[in-house]
Amino acid sequence: MAVSSSADPARAAACFHCGARCPPRAAWVDVVDGASRAFCCAGCLAVAQTIDGAGLDAYYRNRATHAAPRAEREDAVALRACGAAEAGGLVRTLDDGGREVALLIDGMTCGACVVLLERWIAKQPGVAEVRVNYATRRARLVYDAAKTSLATIAGATAAIGYRAYPYDPARRETLARRESRALFARMAIAWLAMMQVMMFAIPAYLSDDGVAPEQRALLEWASLALTLPAVLYSAMPFFRGALRDLRAARVGMDVPIALALAAAFAASAASTFGAGGPVYYDSVTMFIALVLTARYLELSARQRGADAIEALARALPDVAQKLRAWPADGGTETVASATLVPGDLVRVMPGAAVPADGDVVDGRSLVEEAVLTGESRPRERRPGDAVLAGSVNREGALVVRVRAAGNATRVAAVARLADRAAGARPRLAAVADRMAGLFVAGLLVLAAITAAAWIVVDPPRALAVTFAVLVVSCPCAFSLATPAALTVAAGSLARHGVVLARADAIEALSQATHVVLDKTGTLTDGAFRLLDATPRAGLAREDALALAAALEAASEHPVARAICAAAAAGAADGPPRVATDVRAHPGQGLEGTIAGARWRIGRPAYVAALAGANASASDVATHAWPGATLVALGDANGIAATFACADAPRADAAALVARLRTLDIVPVLLSGDRGTTVSAVGTALGIADARGDLSPDDKRAAIAALQAQGAIVAMMGDGINDAPALAQAHVSLALASGAPLAQWKADVVVLAPALCVVADAFALARRTLAVIRRNLRWAAAYNAVAIPAAALGFVSPALAAVGMSVSSLVVVAGALLLRRFAWTSSSS
């Protein structure tokens, strides 16, 4: 296709395919038909590559170059972007054949927009499920491609005043900046108008004799001129939102605001034009300025709270440096990270993010995994070590062999879990939304009754009192009380390596009275370690380990691996010991020849029998590791050494149990391991109720028994063999080290390496619910006092504007206090 390109396509303002404005520093730049082209999103890039590869040059050659001007309507851009998303493979196909996509919603102004969008989109043919998150502006959509298309759904969304784009982090950041700048500009103009209009209103307030009619008229005309920009520009979102709600046959929070502004301004303008009566320009401008200020602060708080959740989506780099023929050739080529396949080799330079899950094959460096685990301290990675997509290489260059890329990476799986939780509305948020809707409807009825009553009692004051009633009420406080707190809490959890996979997880965590803990892989590392080695007199510890490792070299038993690892760590100088003619005796141990002598390792009785004797208490050294597996080493002279190996508790397991107790949460240890081992671990950690020899169904039954006694149970396990127990619990947690994310069924995924973060999650959940309850109580108490006072004429319009804004700000400030939660795991 012969299409001329600009001098610098990478900085082009318009997308080569659809003509939409490209986000700043767009990464979607590729060579199409021999020239570098810029694209607004990955979908347009994929479509352009498909068209070019198919030889369909006529499309670009024949299209009108003026058909996609930079000022093109945003809803048309959104429609084309949705079409490009389907063509570009950004829509996932589910197991049942349905299509799933994450959308970015532009135009939302309050929590009521969520209800309107979900109800409207759910009515569209072919839509199976839709969940909208007000904090992140994201929607999770599931639809039947045989009945509808994504572009059709986007068109239906545009019909009620919103725009839906296929989600990508760059577009989200662009829209967030645009929304913030636009709201700030409206707020600034409203404040300027308010200050000037208040200056003109002061003479009337301070003068005892009043203002001369000709001077008052001049001041009113000046106030009208200054109020017009505030009403026609700054307040326009209120009018658009109210009109959108009325078209959808529902009452949102913008309706009473728009009614109050329209009535007060119309009456004031009529008075200025000669109808007579009071003017309310000062109250109108003050109300607009204060409400916009509250919304701007709420927007800032919401964006900060969502940033931590969205960081997962931004973690995976767009491109990777793929090695062509390493090690023979060190040359690289730049490819999209999503196109990598298992087995590919990539070079990760210092300061760059790892593009895929893989294993280091060359180089040593420190790698930071803060985006996944919340742990900011880099960890050393050397050949053979695993690295995760999204982690950042801090020092030397690494060569990594890809194991999983794109949607198969761990960070992508975590992002999907977080998106699933963000797309669902928590029960508390749904209740708050219903309360706000009923509140607005009741407010409008009360305002009508108030107006009718004051028309009879004191007609000149009817408008002012009705205006005060509409303004002083605060439905926004009811709607913001829950989502603001939940968003801030979810962001704080994500920053510390705790990802919510279910919307109601915070509420369930806050109510937990018991925490059921698995042992292997949860409270322990899941790998045996040598805890103690006791050689007989005259035999050095290193020599005993070397002899044992020689016999165990070919064994895959966990105890054998632990002894070999300990021997390698403390190996002495000199040639290694080699065992020959090694024979295994199932259930007993191993026997082989080392330097011409026969040696055995295994059960003490089996080893002692080599010397023609029975193992006695004096032969087997005592140790301080109850529940550990005891292994003996011996020759024809008897037992030469004993080794104690166990899957020992993690370093911070005891701290986790102690922290749970301070929260009045009862820890319970349920494991399938031997009862004696489980009892020993429970004693070491201070867990009174520790039970072993349990099958997965036994664990489920034990949790059910606790629930029958009234306990609210949280279960923490590895997510696979504990699946019945995880499903039975009120809320379930899985550790990242336990199993692949694709198999997790937990409500909460703990990525952080420190176990104490789990106890902090319970504490933060309780704090969050306390803040929500306090916010709701404040909103209810404020409205219970303010609305009757306004209806009785005790609240002026200006004071009503101040009260309404302060009420919203108190709710947002209360939610922001959650950011100051002290994480004990951060200092551990």
Image: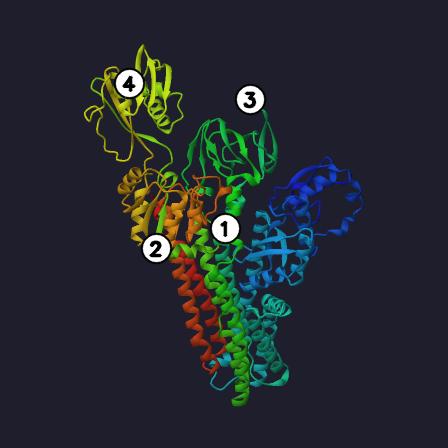
Residue 761 seen in render:
no
Q: Find numbered disc 4 in the image and state the secondary structure of the residue it sits on.
A: helix
Mark nearest the camera among 2 and 4 is 2
The residue beneath circle 4 is 543
The residue beneath circle 2 is 513
Check the image and report above or below for 82 versus 357.
Answer: below
Q: Amino acid at mark 2?
A: Thr
Q: Which numbered circle lies on residue 542?
A: none
Neighbours of disc 4 within 10 Å: few (<14), some (14-19), many (20+): some
Q: Earlier along the polypeptide chain: callout 1 or callout 4?
A: 1
Residue 790 seen in render:
yes
Q: Earlier along the polypeptide chain: callout 1 or callout 2?
A: 1
Neighbours of disc 1 within 10 Å: few (<14), some (14-19), many (20+): many
Q: Which numbered circle lies on residue 307?
A: 1
Tell me the residue at 53%/47% (across/down).
416
Q: Amino acid at mark 1?
A: Asp
Q: Amino acid at mark 4?
A: Asp
Report the quarter where the N terminus lies. top right
Alpha carbon distance from label 3 to label 2: 57 Å
Foreground: 272 or 759? 759
Q: Position of residue 482 (x, y in %)?
A: 46, 61
Q: Is residue 158 left or right of residue 345?
A: right
Neighbours of disc 3 within 10 Å: few (<14), some (14-19), many (20+): few
Tell me the residue at 62%/85% (across/down).
275
Q: Find numbered disc 1 in the image and state the secondary structure of the residue it sits on.
A: helix
Q: Earlier along the polypeptide chain: callout 4 or callout 3?
A: 3
Alpha carbon distance from label 3 to label 1: 40 Å
